[in-house]
Amino acid sequence: MKQIFDTLRYYIIPATTAMGVLGFTLGGSYVWLGFLTYPVLLLFDVLLPKDFKIRNAIAPLVDLSFYLHTIAMIALYTMFILSVRNGTNPLNEGWSSTGQILGSILSLAWLSAVPTLPVAHELMHRRHPFPRFIAKVLNTFYGDSNRDIAHVMTHHIHLDTAEDSDTPFRGQTVYSFCISATLGSYRDTVNMEAEILRKMGQSPWNIRNKVWLHLFLQISLFTVVLTFAGLPALLVCIVSVFFAKMLVEGFNYFQHYGLLRVENGPVEKHHAWNHLGTIVRPLGAEITNHINHHLDSYIRCYDLTPEPKAPQMPSLFLCFMTGLIPPVWFKFIAKPALKEWDNKYASPAEQKLARDANAKAGWEQWIQEKPETHFVPAE
């Protein structure tokens, strides 16, 4: 019975997206339905206890939930287009359309980021080309179909260092990070693809460059929306993709905020924040059960072991909410968590980096004179 429950919990992923599909199917004010799953899930994740349990799921059935989500995302955009075409979701009737436009943007953006990013993240780390292609399709809904390239070849290698555009520095707000991380991801992808092709003796402009695939997928999404639903729907789609991308970068912001590692040093269990909420773990395809993924990125998400003794953060939903108000985020969550990390987990070399980072951010120096560091060693 436990194995069945451990498996079915991941079906919160397609079920959440299905609410958005239902909303656009019904039209009218129901277009908000997809976005309204956010406050409901937030409430449960904050109120329910932390989930440190090791799961024993039925792998093929969990994978099925990921592919059902892919179908649901296609259905989400299909029903959005149909709702505009049949008039149940009018977008061009002046001020009377404001609620429809805002509800459509928020529902599309929220569901294009969560749980789309976690599913795409899981599939991009698979060895077979089919799930990795599906990941690219899902990544298109937040404007970064080639995210797997920079993620695997930059983030996983340079984790928690200045070379990693997915690691926010101390004092950085979520707003500036979303921009810098987006530009960094695109830059790394373009540079890496060009370098790979040059090493093969081919031009970076070769059709095999995956940047062309990204452009094809992104233009295809926008073209379909424009062709079948018109210009107002296209503008809604573009804005939704933009905000979805900002939400996606928020994941990295809250899972790596302010952490430090000596370049080329080993990745250990204190080099990522873990958000082990009862809701966010299955909804996020265990992306918040994070550090063991960095120790071995080929471990399937449902086989990851939670690490209660590794650095922890509050509910990821709560982090997102407070992160929108940087002084609140810094004072009540980021600084206390980093103070504990610096004194409890950081190596002497990392503590030196932390002192420099705190000084650069204009923060107080809280590292003890003779700290007792307690590592969480990698197994």
Image (tube, rainbow, N blue to C red):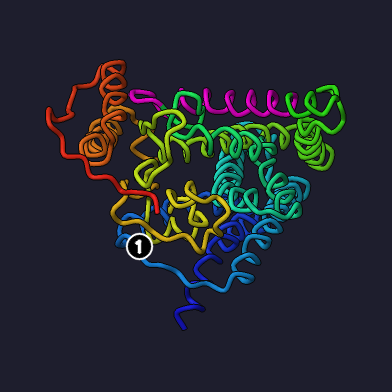
Q: What residue is drawn where x is 40% and y is 40%?
A: 320
Q: Nearer the viewer, residue 130 or 137?
A: 130
Residue type at numbered disc 1: Asp
Expressed as whole percent of the image width and height from the top left, the position of residue 350 reads 31, 30
Q: At which x and y percent is residue 253?
A: 43, 35
Q: Nearer the viewer, residue 161 or 147?
A: 161
CA neighbours of label 1 inside 10 A, class few (<14), some (14 to 19), many (20+): some
Relative image position of residue 173 (x, y in whole percent)? 39, 26
Q: Quadrant of residue 59?
A: bottom right
Residue range in magenta is: 169-194
> Quadrant of residue 324 in the image?
top left
Q: Where residue 125 appears, x then y in whole percent? A: 62, 50
Viewer-proximal residue among 89 and 340: 340
Give the residue displayed 78% in from the left and 26% down from the top. 199
Instruction: Find disc 1 in the rendering and name its residue.
Output: 51
In the figure, residue 144 lies in which quadrant? top right
Residue occupying the point 55% across, 42% down: 106
